[in-house]
Amino acid sequence: MKWKSVDEKYILKIEKGEFVHQTLVQFCKDQNIKNASIAGIGAVEYVKCGYYDLANKTYLFKECHDIVEVASYQGNIMIKEDDLFVHAHGTFSDADNQVFGGHVDEMTVGVVMEIILTPLSSTIERTYDETTGLYLMDI
Amino acid sequence: MKWKSVDEKYILKIEKGEFVHQTLVQFCKDQNIKNASIAGIGAVEYVKCGYYDLANKTYLFKECHDIVEVASYQGNIMIKEDDLFVHAHGTFSDADNQVFGGHVDEMTVGVVMEIILTPLSSTIERTYDETTGLYLMDI
Amino acid sequence: MKWKSVDEKYILKIEKGEFVHQTLVQFCKDQNIKNASIAGIGAVEYVKCGYYDLANKTYLFKECHDIVEVASYQGNIMIKEDDLFVHAHGTFSDADNQVFGGHVDEMTVGVVMEIILTPLSSTIERTYDETTGLYLMDI
């Protein structure tokens, strides 16, 4: 992963084979960033994304092992159980421009991933919410 | 709705059952914000979104009453007829990661909606445009 | 194209019939902007978008000549071979809220396109990368 700091933002170039969320978390730890917003485009060779089944309080994930364009990708990074957690959603398109998407668990870069990360000076933490079964922002 | 001000932005946590656009408009009124950009992710239990039929100068809306992930959501808030108006587009994904989307009229939070709202110090107003039949930014 | 400068950002209103990427590049040249991030919504009457076939190092593009909503659109503008280049991905929805998307080569505004352009003070250049066959950010 390569990065450049500019105007209180970071431009990230995550490279082929790198895990995007793992890389983002490590980067934030290295820079002592506790909260951030992210947005980016690129192409991935693996993505695990899905849908939250609220009734059963569990994620239904599907995995895609083909190279797909990241048509959209946005989210945030916050504190969760003394670690950092990337909450991001994405849409992905194939060679026919067909799109799938959802909550992104993790993805691996297929060509390159270009992300703008905006650090936030807040220290918002995600705490477990009984009602939804999710870690929600504690604000 | 819970919110936190950070670095001249607002992090919004819109909660289950709340109307997103109605909540955004009320928040901006409370904070005396006239223009803003918005981006967010989450899940909704209702969304009315659609397509502008330019030839007939009317929106073709469809309603979805299932819980769907908000795969992407972005737009702006501006002045319209002495009120505020949210212009936002979104994509939504289901349990099979299938995606639909369009111009978002309104949506109701199904689990949570996390939005970053960036206030803009401008006072851009939308005024009616005869040619398109839409309220366009008067700049 | 109309624009307004606010809070170190630019709000752009690209109008019917205008090429979006060509307009963005010209705007940046006029304002002496070398790097920027962009995000926007609107409707286009033409879009050429597609998928990068890494094995054959070539883009597979499809063209759409119908008016479609721009459900999401985000990317960046950087230097490439002494010129500026828009790297952007988008998702597009039709009258049935069906979505397609991918890497956007160019698109023509169908109704209006509202973009927030955030200039970056960096001067990142895209240089040719043998491995991928693409011009990647040289950082």
Image: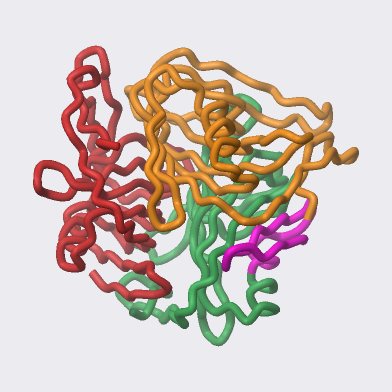
Chain colours: A red, B orange, C green
Q: Residue at x 20, y 32 (%)?
A: A135
Q: Nearer the viewer, residue A68 or A52?
A: A52
**Can you tell which quarter of the image residue A112 is in?**
bottom left
Residue C43 in the figure: left or right of residue C85 = right
Query: Residue C94: x and y, percent?
Result: 62, 32
Asked whether residue A45 is in view, the answer is no
Q: Is residue B81 left or right of residue A124?
A: right
Q: Quadrant of the C terminus of chain A?
A: top left
Residue at the (86%, 41%) spot, across then down: B129
Q: Residue at x 52, y 49 (%)?
A: C90
Across and down, in percent, residue A33 comes to 23, 61
Left/right placement of residue C93 relative to residue C19 reads left
Q: Name the image quarter holding residue C92.
A: top right
The tally of labels here is 0
Q: Residue furthest right?
A: B130
Which residue is outermost to the bottom? Answer: C82
Q: Is residue C99 above or below residue A109?
A: above
Which residue is more in the foreground, A72 or C63? A72
Q: Nearer the viewer, residue B50 or A4?
A: A4
Q: Is residue C116 above or below residue C96?
A: below
Q: In terms of depth relative to the viewer, which is nearer, A24 or B53? A: A24
Q: Quadrant of the N terminus of chain A?
A: bottom left
Q: Which residues are magenta?
A: C1-24
Q: Is residue A76 above or below residue C81?
A: above
